[in-house]
Amino acid sequence: MAKIELSLAPAKAKGLSEDERLDLGRLLLKAGYRVDIVRRRPNTNPGTQYEYFMVLDKGENNA
């Protein structure tokens, strides 16, 4: 199965808090997904908040 990348809105935009991101990651791990939480700073404006993404992979080795 291909990797899935979920965009998580920044906390300022009423997105998920750090605890909520971690809880969601734990639930997805229990469901058999490999989970990576990635933090990126947008290139357009270096003064902006980081954007968070969750990269999911549900391969045969992850079950």
Image: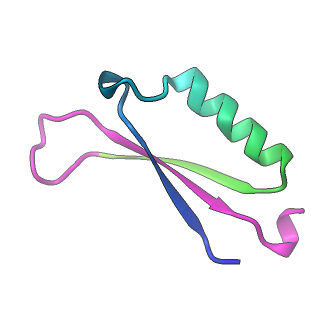
User: In the rendered view of the protein, which quadrant contains the C terminus?
Assistant: bottom right
Q: Is residue 43 above or below residue 62?
A: above
Q: Is residue 53 above or below residue 22?
A: below
Q: Is residue 57 rendered magenta in the image? A: yes
Q: Is residue 29 left or right of residue 8?
A: right
Q: For the point 42% across and 29% down, which residue is it?
A: 15
**Number of marks present in the image shown:** 0
Q: Is residue 5 above or below residue 15?
A: below
Q: For the point 72% across and 57% down, which residue is it?
A: 34
Quadrant in the picture for residue 51: top left
Q: Give the x, y percent position of residue 7.
A: 44, 49
Q: Nearer the viewer, residue 47 or 23?
A: 23
> Residue most toward the right?
63
Q: Give the x, y percent position of residue 22.
A: 63, 31
Q: For the point 16% across and 54% down, which residue is it?
A: 43
Q: Is residue 3 above or below residue 33?
A: below
Task: Find the magenta span and give its range.
Answer: 41-63
User: In the rendered view of the protein, which quadrant contains the N terminus?
Assistant: bottom right
Q: Is residue 23 left or right of residue 63?
A: left
Quadrant in the picture for residue 45: top left
Q: For the point 10% across and 52% down, which residue is it?
A: 44
Q: Is residue 55 left or right of residue 25?
A: left
Give the colour scheme shown.
rainbow
Q: Give the x, y percent position of residue 9.
A: 38, 37
> Residue most toward the front?
14
Q: Give the x, y percent position of residue 32.
A: 84, 55
Q: Is residue 45 rendered magenta in the image? A: yes
